[in-house]
Image: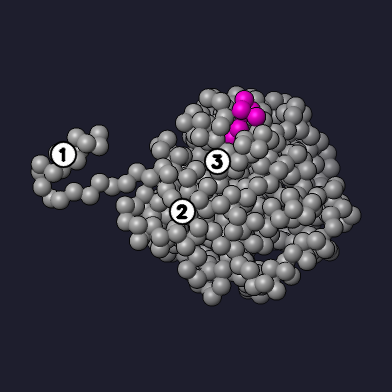
């Protein structure tokens, strides 16, 4: 038995490929500056022979590592020992066949599934990644952890710090850019909240500088350990489908951590012989924050086994600067123009024969209303996945009988402002919140009925409307 560890960090650029110990705290390759993966010497790891082996862990769920929807797949992210795991019981999420939403998107009944990550303890998929980053932070002795955030990462980090008392949270947010639901979590959980002038992209740049200067552990998805945890969303999808591989995974794209993690999950499962094929991946941008779409679909950038011509992306970034173009969408969670995981996402799109689409705020909110009408609501960014599935179906890229899984990344209560404005009977309120974003109508609104405070009028109204 060699005493080299099974897990290590590795630069994603094939021409560099430098490796580092998992004990090092890195968010970029010190040699070439590219992103890092957590990599494994799978030949020496204790991997399952079949995915069904994971089912046994449920009967051992009094053990927190078996209860967690992330760590019960520990053998597929073996960078720590079981006693190092920091978990709050994340990843107990729902997978639901949604026939009404299938009909809305143009899919056959029984073909559309919602993977509802809003069920996580802090209300978004981030907890899947945070438990892994937190575990790594603990392994390296970190005292403070920071992130820039459009709201969910900060809520998740603040929650892990508050529940475990292991670290102090420092969060960076752009001014006026974060929904109250998310901000209220960070404040109540006691995070040091630094609001900077600017948007998420500005905050992301700053937090990296600050973490370098103060030696704070960074938990944004640029941190490769975060993405190890987020692989588990796909493991749970497969589990819910009795280990069958769906035809499509559709996910909103912001900083591109999820899409990157999903691509890595499927590449590894295939390499380990645990699945026989890989589903196609659709990453959906908001139209007002569509860098990935512009670079992948309009300018034809490809991973090309690591031989990417980054000058196209650099030029695009310079053009954004020259035009002072900022990301702008009602889906504030994905209001991001400079996705940090862009290169990893290109790789995932190659692994999964992926496509990228952009959807308008109107399409996002209509899709969100359809999802909510099914009783499991989501926040605007999440609904981009359903709007994207509908678009791809209308283009004939997704077939009516394909089995499609849309990832609902965040809870409905994260951002009530958009929901209330969509359903309002007050046109001025609608115009103020949504009209300014090009949303013209609310085709699926469930408007409150306004009645005088009078019994017979109330009875009349109820008779009329129910
Ligand atoms: N959906 C929600 C609800 C999110 O909060 C985010 C990202 C995304 C989708 C995009 O995911 O980055 O993996 O492509 N929110 C980050 C945050 C940026 O700070 O909370 P991605």
Image height of 369 relative to 157, above or below: above
Locate residue 74, reporting x and y percent.
Answer: 64, 39
- Regarding mark 1 in the picture, which secondary structure is present there? helix
Query: Mark 1 vs mark 3: which is more N-terminal?
Result: 3
Q: Mark 3 points at which residue?
A: 386
Left or right: where 349 falls relative to 106: right
Question: How far apart are the two marked residues, 1 and 2, measured between alpha carbons?
Answer: 31 Å
Name the magenta segment's main secondary structure.
Answer: loop
Q: Name the residue under label 1.
A: 460
Q: Could you tell me which quadrant the C terminus lies in? A: top left
Q: Residue furthest left?
A: 455
Q: Mark 2 points at which residue?
A: 440
Locate residue 409, reporting x and y percent.
Answer: 53, 46
Mark 2, other Cα within 10 Å: few <14 / some 14–19 / many ≥20: few
Would you say the residues marked 1 and 3 are in contact, meaning their CB atoms lie under 8 Å apart?
A: no
Q: Can residue 105 be seen in this view?
A: yes
What are the residue bounds of the magenta stretch?
Answer: 399-406
């Amino acid at each position: 038995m060699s005493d080299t560890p099974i897990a290590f960090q590795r630069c994603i650029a094939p021409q560099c490929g430098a490796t580092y110990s998992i004990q090092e705290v890195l968010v970029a390759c010190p040699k070439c500056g590219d992103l890092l993966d957590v990599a494994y010497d799978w030949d020496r790891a204790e991997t399952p022979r079949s995915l069904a082996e994971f089912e046994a862990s449920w009967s051992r769920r009094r053990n927190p590592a078996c209860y967690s929807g992330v760590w019960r797949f520990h053998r597929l992210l073996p960078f720590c020992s079981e006693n190092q795991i920091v978990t709050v019981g994340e990843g107990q999420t729902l997978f639901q066949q949604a026939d009404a939403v299938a009909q809305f998107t143009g899919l056959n009944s029984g073909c559309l599934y919602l993977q509802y990550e809003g069920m996580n303890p802090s209300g978004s998929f981030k907890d899947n990644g945070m438990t892994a980053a937190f575990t790594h932070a603990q392994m390296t002795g970190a005292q403070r952890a920071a992130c820039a955030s459009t709201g969910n990462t900060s809520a998740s980090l603040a929650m892990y710090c508050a529940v475990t008392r292991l670290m102090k949270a420092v969060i960076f947010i752009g001014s006026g850019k974060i929904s109250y639901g998310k901000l209220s979590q960070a404040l109540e959980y006691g995070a040091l909240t630094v609001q900077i002038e600017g948007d998420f992209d500005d905050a992301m740049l700053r937090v990296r500088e600050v973490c370098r200067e103060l030696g704070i552990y960074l938990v944004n998805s640029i941190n490769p350990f975060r993405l190890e945890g987020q692989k588990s969303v796909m493991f749970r999808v497969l589990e819910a489908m009795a280990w069958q591989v769906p035809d499509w995974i559709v996910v909103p794209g912001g900083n591109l951590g999820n899409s990157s993690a999903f691509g890595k999950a499927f590449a590894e499962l295939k390499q380990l012989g645990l699945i026989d094929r890989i589903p196609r991946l659709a990453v959906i941008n908001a139209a007002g924050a569509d860098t990935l779409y512009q670079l992948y679909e309009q300018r034809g950038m490809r991973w090309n086994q690591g031989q990417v011509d980054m000058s196209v992306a650099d030029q695009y970034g310079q053009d954004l600067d020259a035009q002072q173009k900022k990301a702008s969408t009602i889906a504030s969670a994905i209001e991001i123009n400079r996705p940090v995981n862009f290169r990893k996402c290109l790789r995932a799109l190659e692994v999964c024969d992926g496509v990228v689409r952009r959807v308008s705020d109107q399409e996002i909110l209509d899709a969100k209303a359809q999802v909510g009408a099914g009783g499991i609501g989501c926040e605007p960014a999440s609904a981009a996945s359903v709007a994207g599935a509908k678009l791809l179906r209308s283009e004939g890229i997704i077939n009516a009988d394909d089995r499609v899984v849309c990832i609902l990344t965040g809870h409905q209560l994260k951002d009530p402002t958009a929901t209330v404005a969509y359903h309002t009977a007050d046109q001025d309120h609608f115009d103020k919140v949504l009209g300014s974003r090009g949303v013209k109508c609310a085709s699926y609104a469930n408007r409150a009925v306004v009645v005088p405070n009078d019994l017979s009028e109330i009875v009349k109204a109820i008779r009329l409307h129910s």
